[in-house]
Amino acid sequence: MTPDAHAAVRRSIEAIWHLEAARVIGRVARIVRDVGLAEECAQDALVAALEHWPAAGVPANPAAWLMTAAKRRALDHLRHHRLAADRAAAIGRELDFQHELASEALAEQVDAELDDRIGDDSLRLIFTACHPVLSPEARCALTLRVMGGLTTAEIARAYLKPEPTIAQRIVRAKRTLAAARVPFELPPAAELKSRLAPVLEVIYLIFNEGYAATAGEDWTRPALCEEAMRLGRVLAGLMPDESEVLGLLALMEIQASRLKARIGADGAPVLLLDQERARWDRLLIRRGLDALARAEALPGALGPYALQAAIAACHARAPTRELTDWARIAALYDALAQVAPSPVVSLNRAVAVSMAFSPAAGLEIVDALADEPSLRHYHLLPSVRGDLLTRLERLDEARAEFERAAALTRNARERALLLARAARCRSTP
């Protein structure tokens, strides 16, 4: 196999892994009852794919290949180490593990014996990894690691934390779950609501990583958005009267409607105000607006996700950029800052204020965030400041901000966009 062909297979494996990791880990976790061990088995399957597929070719059903390899590793572990011996016997009774595990009949038997009331391993995986025995930070870091195949670096970027800090959280979280013998299952109905907040946060972070990838050559990773929306729909079916569940689903559906318009024909990013709105997915918009309407109809004030969905709805309802209701968006960000204050919310509010009132008003808010520690390495802070300075015709300052933003981002497409904007500041009279 030529080096180019070998590299192409590796890229295919990486793409398949990002899509299938959560399902593989979730299914194996039901066998071994240990999230950390399940990830190890899944990683063994990934290593096996990296060893065999370049020579043998990508199989016709790569997801099933990975699942079978991971299950084989899990059942071998149970047999050799005598862990959960009764469960291993129940799953694999009268079967030769090495010979028959790959058969479709056995796979169906294992799945049937492990099934329960909702039948979604990924959702079980999230609730298990978000167990109260873990700290809030550890819950989200671990779940992002095992869902969608996100790397430690990507999680660190999402949380604006150093990579070693996130790595330590993940290791400690796995050990804590194993030591506490946390069951791999959905919590009882009475506990679902109290366990909901970190689960929603994780689903949204997965979506965001798909919507705007933190690193790599691609600006978006639609498969992650699809996985997050799928989990959101399952959760909405499980908890149809929870405003924030519906709000998050609405937010993701409306945001995802823009995915095709976010990338130009040359693969370059296209910012919101420059997007061709005819390319927005009207079906996703209708679904998102419907979910938002159901959230708004429930009693009580809107929470952070429903408020963000209402902001997204303002863009979705505007037929053109000029008709966007920026005053309402600014007001919604004011409300969001009251219920869920954060530096990132303040930065987004600055953009809305600049559009509703003036760039100078927005810049005043941005400048107040200059010394915020969590934004020190956040590329969107200088990016937003560069945009506002451009609108104020302070081009030399804007160029410097765009160049600083480009140096901070780890996404190749976004870096190219920021450098192009810096170059335009230099060439404009």
Image (cartoon, grey):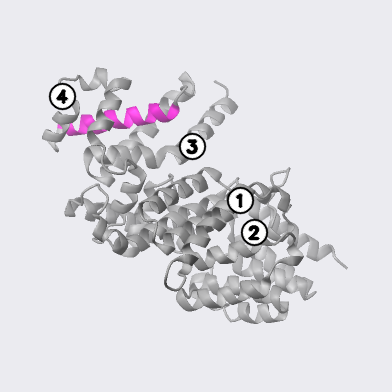
Secondary structure at numbered mark 1: loop
Residue in the foreground of this view, choosing between 418 and 144: 144
Secondary structure at numbered mark 2: helix
State which quarter of the image contains the C terminus.
bottom right
Q: Are marks 1 and 2 in contact (CB under 8 Å)?
A: yes
Give the extent of the magenta segment. Answer: 62-80
Residue at horizontal 26 percent and vertical 19 percent from the top: 100
Q: Mark 2 points at which residue?
A: 316
Secondary structure at numbered mark 3: helix
> Where residue 93 is drawn, which disc sits there?
4
State which quarter of the image contains the N terminus.
top right
Q: Is residue 90 left or right of residue 122?
A: left
- Residue 389 quadrant: bottom right
- Is 94 one of the magenta-colored residues? no
Q: In this view, does 89 lie to the left or right of 68?
A: left
Identity, as a three-letter code, of the amino acid under mark 1: Ser
Looking at the image, is mark 4 or mark 1 nearer the viewer?
1
Residue in the foreground of this view, choosing between 285 and 41: 285
Looking at the image, is mark 2 or mark 3 nearer the viewer?
2
Counting residues from the N terminus, which is met first, the one under dot 4 or under dot 3? Answer: 3
Residue 305 in view: no
What secondary structure characterizes most of the magenta part? helix
Q: Name the residue under label 3.
A: 14
Residue 150 in view: yes
Counting residues from the N terminus, which is met first, the one under dot 2 or under dot 3? Answer: 3
- Marks 1 and 2 sit apart, C-alpha to C-alpha, by 9 Å
Identity, as a three-letter code, of the amino acid under mark 2: Ala
Q: Mark 1 points at which residue?
A: 257
Relative to 301, residue 424 above or below:
above
Counting residues from the N terminus, which is met first, the one under dot 1 or under dot 3? Answer: 3
Looking at the image, is mark 1 or mark 3 nearer the viewer?
1
Relative to 284, residue 334 above or below:
below
